Amino acid sequence: MKHYLTIICNRYLPGFSAKRIKKIMAIILSMLIFTASFCQSGALKGRVTDKETNEKIPFANILLLLDSTLCGGTQTDFDGNFTIKPIEPGLYELKATYVGYKTTVVKGIKINADQITFYDIEIEYTAESLPEIVVTDYKIPLINRDMTCSGGCVTSKEINKMPGRSSGSIATCIGGLYSSDGENGNVRGARINSTVMYIDGIRVVGTSEIPHSSVEPTSKATSDKSIKTEVLPVINNEKFMPGQLTAGEINDFSKWEMWKDISGDELKQYQNLWDIKPKNRYCVQVMTQNGFPVVGCVVKLLDGKDDVIWTSKTDNTGKAEVWAGLFESKSINEKKYSIEIKYGKISKRIKRPKLFHKGINSATLNAFCNTPDNVDILFAVDATGSMGDEIRYLKAELKDVIEKFSVSNPDLKLRMGSVFYRDEGDEYITKKSDFSADIQQTIDFIAKQNAGGGGDTPEAVDKALEVSINSLSWSENARARLVFLILDAPPHSGDENITRLQQTIDIAAETGIKIIPITGSGINKSAEYLMRAIALATNGTYIFLTDDSGIGGKHTKPSIDDYEVELLNDLITRLLLQFTYVEDCNKLPVPEENQDLINTDIVDQFDEMQPKEQVKESDTSKDADDAVPGVPEKTVEKIWIKSYPNPTSGIVNIEHSKKVKEIFVVDISGKILQRYNNYEKDLIKVDLSEFPNGMYFLKYANVDHWEYAKIILTH
């Protein structure tokens, strides 16, 4: 051994002695052993929620035990999520505890090597002083959320029970493989050479249509007749379950300074290519005297000659975005601009409006709260061949989102439509299904569409948007008009195409239509810039699919500092709620301690209230006749909070009574975003600047119920 090491030292590593080589080899061997042992561990992820309300539970204690011995633990975050890793493979007990809730123990949690086990825990509120322990048996999930590819085994016993004996018919019982004729299986939309199937060592290779002739023997048959399939993470199953695709959101309104930096640096080269530059932004907030947002108000940016530069409409939060020089390169003269606001017969003008970095342009109208119930939602989908890896998953996601949202919002006058598009020279350029209150009509139309054609990267995105905005029957009065533009390739960049895009964007903004791009694999930086610019111009937001699902091709990471990965299904549902929610006009705000007052002209001024008022506390344990004469009834300080400014561009000041123990910041879906407790100061400063525009609530406990104070965030 020493002889060989000496040869190595002299020939390949001059200057290294054999003794030194031994030390290096020992270190490398130790590292390999450590790495191998580390790779054998697993992880556990989940979420803790209230069993009755489904509310996320932050800061719950999570303990992992093996034979009553503590092996690991953590606390849930603001969203109730937890992660424990690394964990040696085995069967564990999982314990969740939280003040005011029953301790929950789940037995038999199975941790596998090199896999993430997902388990969500529901804990039950209790009014008892002594904690109660709820014990649950762990059930192996039907779908392994950590498996990014489809596959499985069919045993001889299962084969004996099947009517078919061909490889194709047997393979179709594997999850993720679909067959329309019971024979040739289509495995999650697999492309050529993406499917591998073994039949007792016999390897099946070839295309997504599995022919019998593509079977070639690779080893001798075993005693147990079985079929095993392994497929790449590609999609093609019209009956595949939703909740698979993962995505992120970039709301450039909430990261405006970063957008200005990115668009002026990393993405600057694409400004001139697409001739769109969202820079000179005027944000307008319109409210009633009672503090309700004015929805559908026409807002115009005018120059010194009263010529219209940009027109927009206020959304469900009463916010509108108007732009100067969006499609022009010349500098602007902001001192000559004004903003005209019209709502029915009511009009108001803001002279010398402020660019966004100088503040929000606020206006209060002497108008009644009158929010329409109409909501128009359109899905415009790229149906070219390049979308084949994701389109059927998208169809499943859209169907599920449409059904859930329509069922959960029966009071809305909901209409939906869809546009599918390809490119010049294909079977069609656009197909449309106009808006209809019959939601099933839209679902059926989407289900019939398939991917095909295309192949030259740029697609007819401009024509698809033109049809979506100009050729469908949008509601004249609506609380929300939304276009979800789903694509994986940019539009053509010729002069005619860019002019068409600009005209369509202009009309969309004037009509109050938000365009929300959802980009898939194949999107480059040029298309990313354009889609984010379109979202800004129409007061929308930008969504992008991610690699976390393991579905489809490689997804380009966007130019942003950080983002949260969500299920696309949950993300679209959240945005639908965010863009359609309005406060009930019948619940008129009054100047109580938990309600904000908004000055008619300047947002950050507010009326003073008298929160120290003493109120009588009812005692239900005694009858009125049991009152002791001459003894005063017990009084307590009323629980209250007061917040300002409202609307806000980020910072919210909260004054509160000493009785308030905790304050939560929640969104309109009830999701807890921030938590404040154990504070000594009478004034709390809350920063909402990282969140998207919309309506938020300050939630706090008042004896035996929750109180809410509304906050409107406008970036």
Image (cartoon, grey):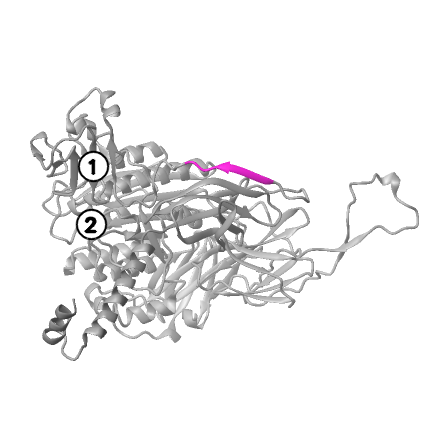
Which of the 4 image quadrants contains residue 301? bottom left
Q: Is residue 25 visible?
A: yes
Q: Residues within 10 Å of mark 1 (few under 14, many from 20)?
A: many
Mark positioned earlier in the residue sequence (1 or 2): 1
Above or below: residue 221 compared with residue 376: above
Overall secondary structure of the magenta stretch? strand
**Is 28 placed left or right of 567 in the picture?**
left
Q: Position of residue 320 (x, y in %)?
A: 41, 59
Residue in view at x 49 percent, y 41 percent: 106
Q: Position of residue 283 (x, y in %)?
A: 42, 64
**Is 525 placed left or right of 143 in the picture?**
left
Q: Which residues are magenta?
A: 133-139
* Residue occupied by mark 2: 463
Q: Is residue 280 visible?
A: no
Q: Position of residue 90 (x, y in %)?
A: 40, 44
Residue in view at x 32 percent, y 43 percent: 244
What's under tag 2, amino acid-wise? Lys
In this rendering, which labeled residue sits more in front, label 1 or label 2?
Answer: 1
Say which of 369 and 569 sits in front: 569
In the rendered image, which quarter contains the N terminus? bottom left
Say which of 592 and 524 sits in front: 524
- Total numbered labels placed on residues in the image: 2
Which of the 4 image quadrants contains residue 683? bottom right
* Residue 451, magenta (yes or no): no
* Residue occupied by mark 1: 229
* Residue 137, magenta (yes or no): yes
